[in-house]
Every structure is written in C-alpha cells, then in structure tokens.
Image (cartoon, rainbow, N blue to C red):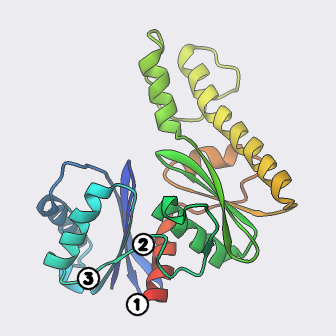
Amino acid sequence: MLLAVDIGNTNIVLGVYNGKKLSHHWRIDTDRHKTADEYRMLIKSLLDLDELGLKKIKSVIISCVVPPLLTVFEEISKNYLNVRPIIVNHKTKTGIKICYKNPSEVGADRIVNAVAAYHEFGGPVIIIDFGTATTFCVVSSKGEYLGGVIVPGITISAEALFEKAAKLPAVELIKPKSVIGKDTISSMQSGIIYGYAGMVDAIVERIKKETGYKNPMIVATGGLSGLIAPETKSIKKIMPLLTLDGLRLIYERNR
C-alpha cells in the first residue's frame, strides 16, 4: 500500500492507496513542534483504527511546504516504515512543465494539484486551493504550469479582522442567511464568504482575459473549498482530495 502525505501549513492530509483506490484518508493539525516519535504514534493510531497497520505500508510519497516537518516525516518513513520516500519538488518527474522564472519557488502542493487536475481534465485548467493561502494555478492545454496567484487565506483574513479590530469578535466560518447582515457576526460572515467568492470570480475573469482561454476547467480543492466554491459563478468542480490523487499519480511516474 502507498501512504501519500501532504504537509500544509495548517493541516496534514494523509491517504492510503491500495493500487489506484484511495481506501482511507485523514486530516490532522500541522504542529511544527511534534517529534518524529509523536507523529509516528499518531499515524500508527490512525492506521490501527482502520485495521491497516504500519507493516502494510510499502511505499511513501510526500509533498511539503513546511520544511522542518519534511525531515520529521522522512525519518518516520525511513526508520519506522523502512521505506525511502519520494519527495515532490520542481525536479520530480511529473509530466508537467513548470514555466515559473524560478521553478524551485513553486510549492510542492501546487505542483501536485496541477498534475492531478491536468490528468483528470486536460487543459487549460485553473486550480484554486483554499488552504492557509488561497492559490490559483494555471495549466495550459499542453500541460505547462504557467504560474498563478497567491492571496491570504480565508482563515488568515478572518483572524486578522478579529485581531486588528478591537470591537469585532471571532466568528465561525459559515454561510450567513443573507448578504446584508443583521448583526455584527452575520455581517462579518457575509463579508468573508461572499467577499472571497467575488474575489475568486474576479481573478478568474482576469486570468481568462490574459490567457485568452474562453472556457477553462476550473477546479477547487482544499479544506475550505466546500464553503466558498458553491457561492462562486466560475468554479465547476470541487475536489477536496485532489492533492492526494496528484501524489498517487506522481508516485506511479517515479516508482
């Protein structure tokens, strides 16, 4: 079985593949202070709960945007699973040509998402990942990673509003009943949810105008994709586990 690990700034998503089938997946908090032993015990507990066990894991692939944790998960893979992991970066064989000025600057998660979306839909395709940051990635019909857009994530923006405005409370990120809020909380929820939805549509229109793409496939992923995507006009498909699919594809191209 293959263990796919996507280490993000807020969450770590793990998936176990039996061939091409995703049999189990979990989402845990990213904690830069946890040791390899602590993460090993956590992963072992998750696997044991689903009657998998560490010994069934024969391959590991990792994408990571938190450098200190890459060493931790490499240690887990080598010392506890006896597996040399595949680490995704701009040099990895992916089938995607990266057209960034400096390819090493492209996050592993963005590369993986591009691979998965292009494999699923072809191009042109725009991938919008609602994570710690909200990222837009553009892939051409030839499988070229053209670049993208990075904006502060939804949670970051909501927390900044709470921290910097003395009279504004922390709010739950849920869709309000109406755009026009009737109290402070619903007004903030409206601004966050519909504000981000409007931003997504505006950026997508600018990308289409700049590239000349009239009808690109637009895919949403990430932990908050289900909250924002339905309120947009542009997003056509929500795939919360797109990154895990991309990791499996890259593993198959490099094993």
Which numbered tag is attached to residue 41?
A: none
Please give the name of the residue rendered at 43% of the width and 83% of the height, measured from the top-left corner: 251
Query: Quadrant location of residue 194?
Result: top right
20 with respect to 27 (left or right): right
Give the mark nearer the N terminus: 1 vs 2: 2
Vertical arrangement, residue 163 with respect to residue 41, above or below: above
Instruction: Spot the residue most to the front.
Output: 101
For mark 3, give the secondary structure: loop
- Quadrant that contains the N terminus: bottom left
For mark 1, give the secondary structure: loop
Give the mark nearer the N terminus: 3 vs 1: 3
- Work out whether residue 207 can be spotted: yes
Which numbered tag is attached to residue 84?
A: 3
Vertical arrangement, residue 163 with respect to residue 239, above or below: above
Please give the name of the residue rendered at 62% of the width and 44% of the height, measured from the top-left corner: 228
Circle 1 Cα neighbour tier, 10 Å, few/some/many (<14 / 14–19 / ≥20)? few
Real-space Cα separation, disc 1 to disc 2, in angstroms: 12 Å
Q: Which of 210 and 225 is in front in this view?
A: 210
Q: Give the residue number, with chain letter if any, for mark 1.
A: 255
For mark 2, give the secondary structure: loop
Q: Give the residue number, with chain letter if any, for mark 2.
A: 88
Q: Which amino acid does label 2 sit on?
A: Val
Q: Where is residue 35 in the image (x, y as percent from the top left)?
A: 15, 57
Q: Where is residue 200 in the image (x, y as percent from the top left)?
A: 69, 44
Please give the name of the residue rendered at 53% of the width and 62% of the height, measured from the top-left corner: 110
Q: Where is residue 107 in the image (x, y as percent from the top left)?
A: 48, 60
Please give the name of the residue rendered at 51% of the width and 73% of the height, measured from the top-left corner: 246
